């Protein structure tokens, strides 16, 4: 991959152009990483409203009609429903792994095949998430695991 940067004082706003013969998973990861830098989500913890960068979110989970957002060291609640969080975060490298959970693929450190075609994902902080059969093939494909 060739990277070039042009500094031009007359440019008003930074512009990024990717030229490639086809869209690859590597390019998709680069795009997701760039989107993570600018995407934010509003959450609450202990009565305090916090604005989190999407890059700090490891996964989102819905439990008892409440949506929780997890970072490496904290758990937050959001007023968003899980499908709304998915719409907000899917462009940033998040994927659905079950009916009640979204995971940022960049935080996955290991995966293990489970009984019944399920997967067990181990995240950067050591937490483990089970991927249901329905989503396992897509996760394998996105992580380029055969």
Image (spheres, helix red, strand yellow):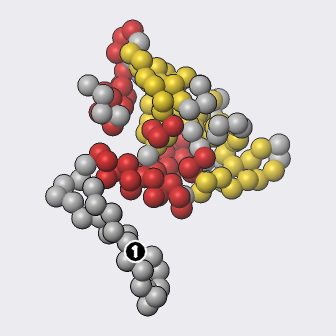
Question: On the picture, is 128 further left or further right than 87?
Answer: right
Q: Residue furthest left?
A: 21
Residue at the location (33% across, 68% down)?
4
Q: Is residue 114 above or below residue 81?
A: above
Viewer-proximal residue, 123 or 91?
Answer: 123
Viewer-proximal residue, 6 or 95?
Answer: 6
Q: Residue furthest top?
A: 115
Can residue 113 be seen here? The reply is yes
Can residue 87 be seen here? The reply is no
Residue 64 x %, y %: 65, 29
Residue at the location (44% across, 31% down)?
97
Q: Is residue 65 above or below residue 23?
A: above
Q: Secondary structure at mark 1?
A: loop
Q: Pointer 1: residues within 10 angstroms few (<14), some, or many (20+)?
A: few
Q: Is residue 145 above or below residue 25?
A: above
Viewer-proximal residue, 58 or 2?
Answer: 2
Question: On the picture, is 13 further left or further right than 58?
Answer: left
Viewer-proximal residue, 110 or 49?
Answer: 110
* Quarter where residue 70 is shown: top right
Residue at the location (69% across, 49% down)?
43
């Amino acid at each position: 991959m060739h990277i070039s940067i042009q500094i031009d004082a007359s440019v008003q706003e930074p512009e990024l152009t990717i030229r490639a013969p086809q869209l690859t998973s590597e390019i998709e990861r680069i795009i997701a990483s760039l989107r993570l830098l600018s995407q934010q989500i509003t959450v609450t913890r202990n009565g305090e409203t916090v604005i989190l960068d999407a890059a700090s979110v490891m996964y989102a989970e819905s439990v008892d009609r409440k949506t929780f957002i997890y970072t490496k060291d904290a758990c937050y609640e959001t007023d968003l429903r899980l499908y709304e969080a998915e719409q907000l975060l899917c462009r940033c490298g998040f994927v659905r792994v079950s009916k009640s959970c979204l995971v940022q693929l960049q935080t996955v450190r290991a995966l293990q095949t489970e009984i019944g075609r399920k997967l067990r994902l181990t995240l950067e902080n050591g937490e483990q998430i089970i991927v249901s059969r329905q989503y396992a093939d897509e996760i394998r494909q996105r992580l380029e695991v055969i």
